[in-house]
Image: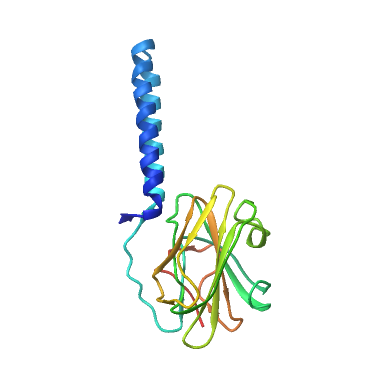
Amino acid sequence: MKLHKEGFTIIIWTCVILTVLQLGNFYLYDSIRQGWLFWLLSVGFIVVAILVIQFFRVPIRKPIFEDHDVLCPADGKVVVIEEVEETEYFHDKRIQISIFMSPLNVHANFHPVSGTVKYVKYHPGKYLVAWHPKSSTENERSTIVTEHVSGKEVLFRQIAGAVARRIVYYPEEGDQVTSGSEFGFIKFGSRIDVFLPTDAEVKVKIGDKVKGIKTLLATI
């Protein structure tokens, strides 16, 4: 287990602010001598620190996959599996699999397939709740398309939620990427959509709890 680099600044500032608040808590206790309030606030500050630190945790996982496997790009819960019209890149029918990440999930994101990055685009947008049907097209989001060695392309999209206000992604067009390697991070609750060819064999079902790198999403 390690802490993600995207969290270092937030963790440091959180600890500084909580330390200042705790110093104020000591001063308050000296003034009013309310032991229950002192301990309530102290425990609250500790809980906040733990929640922020755990949000940026990244477990050490070794990807195990076959050539045609599509690995799960994030921890969370499968909330959508359906055939849809993908309108940004493919402009045709695709199988969409959506994974909702709660604030308690690991929020590092991983490449679902190995291959060549063909398309990368960032879209500013709204902050609807991540499970809202329009969040996929109206929220802040990034879209990445990777061409597999078979010639098939997989599109995956980071979507910011009502709490998430910043998405981070690292690939650039032309990069060669490996399945299971990290491609980005979403800060606080969010969602990942994966668009697969219609002949893909889906290996998960709605309601499944999935783990990035560890869960087999589909084969193409």
Q: Quadrant of the N terminus?
A: bottom left
Q: Which colour assignment does the render follow?
A: rainbow
Q: Can see residue 95?
A: yes
79 over 70 or under it: above or below: above
Q: How many marks?
A: 0
- Measured as percent of width and height from the top left, residue 162 is found at 59, 48
Residue in the picture at 39% in, 25% down: 40
* Observer-nearest of 14 and 179: 14
Percent of width and height locating residue 26: 33, 20
Going 37% across and 22% down the picture, which residue do you hit? 25
Q: Residue at x 45, y 56 (%)?
A: 107
Residue 152 placement: quadrant: bottom right
Q: Nearer the viewer, residue 174 or 169?
A: 174
Is residue 42 visible in the rendered image? The answer is: no
Q: Position of residue 97 (x, y in %)?
A: 57, 69
Q: Could you tell me which residue is drawn at 64 percent across and 71 percent down?
A: 82
Going by the picture, which residue comes out furthest to the bottom?
150
Image coords of residue 121 (percent x, y): 57, 67
Left or right of residue 205: residue 40: left
Q: Place residue 109 in its image quadrant.
A: bottom left
